[in-house]
Amino acid sequence: MQSYSSAGLAKRPRVAEEPEGLSAKLKDLLVGQSEAIDTIIPFIQMHQAGLSPEGRPIGVILLLGPTGTGKTRTVEALAEVLHGNSKHLLRVDCGEFQMEHEVAKLVGAPPGYLGHRETQPMLTQAKLNSLTSETSDISLVLFDEIEKAAPSMTRLLLGILDKATLRLGDNTSVNFERTLIFLTSNLGAKAIQRTNTPDFGFEAMLPRPSIEDTRKVQSIGMGAVRRKFSPEFVNRIDSVITYKPLGRAACELILDQIFANFSELIRTRLGIRGFRLQCTPSGRDLLLENGTSVEFGARELKRTVQRNFIQPVSALVAQGQVPSGSTVILDAKAGEFNVLLRH
């Protein structure tokens, strides 16, 4: 039986003092995508050494792959390691900018235009500066699901990606030289999934390709990117990372993280009213069986834990049925989950 106790959780340091430490901490937070970490670390090292190219962002990195594989989580983990908070970043949801006129929200309306004073730009120098911390001067900006944005957004980004400069509606400039820019996209995701898990025809009978052999996957992703975006835009991207669907081993580590985070939440929110968590091997196996999904990735596993454990436990706590210091156990029999209480 596996136990999860918040007492044993060490407080994570705010930032790595050396490259090896930064890499190790990121790999603790981001499961199953070590290639992504190995690609991102050199950009940070170049900046820390003062050797990043002048007049450009620290790096422009495109994250490709199916949903639930850790693309957005990568940037959140980096924010946690650099700044001590996974929310210490600027996230632009490109799904909110599908119409051309909505892109003006990023830079604000020019003086004299209707709504000039009411339209405050999202990308300002003050906003970028607020994203730094005492432990790092790097600002993290994430353009999530970039393929959903109106064409005018990608044209707007050309100046940022190439010259690290954005001209706002009031004619002031924003400098992105100390900014690490991430773009995420699901382009080519379905084809990548079919490559890893073909579901029909002769290919379905063949052994699955090696998880280390990513050339075909990268080719599929980049083909989709080139069909969607102009050569000028693609040429300004420094690095492309293609995320592979998560396997069983990665999901097991993510499950440990989910339980550890839930234990920490119990400790911080309930204090002396807290309790311990345990999961039997059968409960763990059923969670992984129901929550491992090639299509939805780690998100399906999180939903499975929430539906079958976190929500039932929360109901017991709300009803005052979980005494302080007791142990709540997740078990499974005959394909059904059971939440047990041990005083």
Image (cartoon, rainbow, N blue to C red):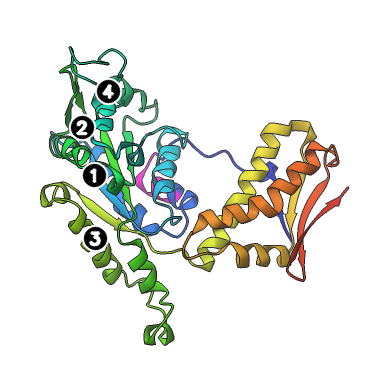
Determine the secondary structure under disc 1: strand
Residue farthest left in this picture: 232
Residue at screen point 60% across, 42% down: 10
Q: Is residue 235 left or right of residue 331?
A: left
The dominant secondary structure in magenta is helix
Q: Are marks 1 and 2 in contact (CB under 8 Å)?
A: no
Q: Position of residue 63 (x, y in %)?
A: 32, 52
Determine the secondary structure under disc 4: loop
Indicate yes or no whether the magenta region holds residue 339. no
Q: Nearer the viewer, mark 4 or mark 2?
A: 4
Q: Is residue 223 visible?
A: yes
Q: Which residues are magenta?
A: 17-24
Residue 224 circle label: 3
> Circle 1 sits on which residue?
60
Q: Residues within 10 Å of mark 2 (few under 14, many from 20)?
A: many
Q: Position of residue 122 (x, y in %)?
A: 31, 26
Q: Amino acid at mark 3?
A: Ala
Determine the secondary structure under disc 2: loop
Quarter of the rendering containing residue 81: top left
Determine the secondary structure under disc 3: helix
Q: Amino acid at mark 2?
A: Glu
Q: Position of residue 326 (x, y in %)?
A: 83, 45
Sequence-wise, the earlier of marks 4 and 2 is 4
Indicate yes or no whether the magenta region holds residue 21. yes
Q: Work out whether residue 271 or residue 312 is closer to the camera in this orientation and state it.
A: 312
Q: Position of residue 91 (x, y in %)?
A: 37, 36
Residue at screen point 32% across, 29% down: 137
Q: Amino acid at mark 4?
A: Thr
Could you tell me how far apart the alpha carbons at marks 2 and 3 are, in whole angstroms?
A: 29 Å
> Circle 4 sits on which residue?
124
Could you tell me how far apart the alpha carbons at marks 4 and 3 are, in whole angstroms?
A: 31 Å
